[in-house]
Amino acid sequence: MIIEQKIMRNVSLTAHPQGCKQYVLDQIAYVESEKEKSNLSEFPKKVLIVGGSTGYGLSARIVSAIGGNAQTMNVSVEREPQKNKVATPGWYNSIAFEQEAHKRGLYATSVFGDAFSDATKREVANRIKEEMGQIDLLIYSVASPLRIDPDDPTKVYRSVIKPIAKPYSDLSVDVQSGVVEQATIDVADAQQVEETIKVMGGEDWKRWIDYLLKRELLAPGVKTVAFSYIGPSITYPIYREGSIGKAKEDLERTAFELKKSLKDLGGDAFVSVNKALVTRASSVIPVVPLYITILYKVMKEHHVHEDAIMHIWRLFSDRLYSGQHINTDEKGRIRVDDWEMEQQIQDEVLRRWALQKEGSVLVEADLEGFKQEYDNIHGFGYDSIDYGVAVDPTVV
Ligand code: NAD
């Protein structure tokens, strides 16, 4: 079939197998070019990535495997392809990555299932036990709109991205047309905040660690890392001080509980505050695409722009596995968002934000860069691929 890109309300409904492969190959090439310069002896050797098929989780998988020759297992929810139906990009990415890892003699596998369920945890644990022994790093990188309660499957929690104190109104951008528009978002009620914490907070991360500890599948010195975001005050009402911010606070609190749980093993738990990035998850947050288009332009002009693989490479090589003490902020968080949050970058973002006008086309921002990255994460927008040629959607 000929696979065309179909986008509805900032959500891409299709993905291209060859393009997803190219996306993975480009990340592998980046790590291969950087690895000469780092002390890779510190890198982990057996890594479980929960949410490792796209975005930051996929990059963490690629950095672990290609950078440190690690065995990797991904856990993610995917739609598999059929003869006339495309798979999710995460399915194509995982298959493409595993083909490349196997070519290099590296163990790499995926468990496609709901990370929140006990059945998936059991299956993953059984496979770690049989095929890997123990793991020395667990990356938790799930971004999900919902969670089925593992203790009571009739309960479904939904995460929302809404303000808490009062309705929030600010400029946003329609990425497809490039026109600036006003976005107004209602407040989340108490129940919605609770549910968002259930989905995106630390409860499931803790369940993974507790369960793998009980099964004795965590190696001495094991580390676990989950990802958070803070961002500038301009996005606080919708992000940091909104329903998702409450979930991130919960995630950050959980890191302290996990530090205690892992102490006897000489292990450690961290939240890493990452930079804003175009991913499937971030593209559907109101206002954030406007912020990202401006941020990308400013960071590129200052030569400090990073995509997912560059950012995670820096997290591993400069922070987690540099062989030095891991510096954190006053709340115990690793701050790889330091380049994004630099004063001169943020001042310039604010200046450009003030130039935007409702109903006009975005100015002094990197709409093209945003679109290019959004296309790429779904396997589109590569000049090397002829999208007019029919492909079998079941083959990577
Ligand atoms: P993403 O959408 O690219 O990746 C999410 C991953 O979670 C995918 O692998 C997906 O398959 C998996 N997933 C979703 N539901 C699942 C389920 N029920 N079971 C198993 N896997 C499931 O998102 P991302 O932007 O890379 O986000 C990953 C983490 O990074 C999130 O915690 C997010 O808040 C955080 N983060 C993102 C940004 C950003 O700007 N994108 C910035 C800082 C932190």
Image (cartoon, grey):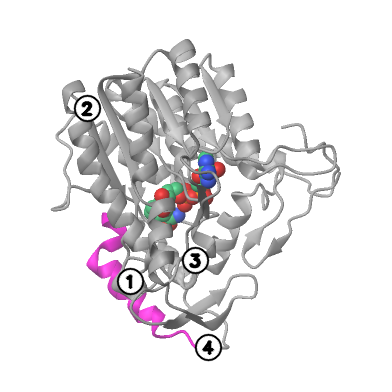
Q: For this rendering, which residue is in front, 239 or 19?
A: 239
- Cα separation between marks 3 and 1: 13 Å
Question: Residue 56 lies in magenta, yes or no?
Answer: no
- Label 4 crowding class (10 Å Cα cut-off): few <14, some 14-19, many 20+? some
Q: Which residues are magenta?
A: 336-357
Per the model, the C-alpha gap separating discs 2 and 3 is: 34 Å
Mark 4 residue's CB less than 8 Å from ligand 1: no
Q: Earlier in the sequence, mark 2 or mark 1?
A: 1
Horizontal side of 219 relative to 56 (left or right) equals: left
Q: Pointer 4: what residue?
A: 358
Q: What is the secondary structure assignment of the residue under circle 4?
A: loop
Residue highlighted by disc 2? 267
**Residue placed under numbered mark 3 in the picture:** 285
- The N terminus - image quarter: top right
Q: Position of residue 335 (x, y in %)?
A: 25, 50
| Nearer the camera: disc 4 or disc 3 | 3
- The one nearer the camera, 321 or 85, is 85
| Residue 44 visible, this angle | no
Q: Which three-letter amino acid code belongs to the residue tagged 1?
A: Tyr
Q: Earlier in the sequence, mark 2 or mark 3?
A: 2
Q: Secondary structure at mark 2?
A: loop
Give the image quarter of residue 223. Answer: top left
Q: CA distance from mark 4 to mark 1?
A: 21 Å
Above or below — where is 229 with respect to 39? below
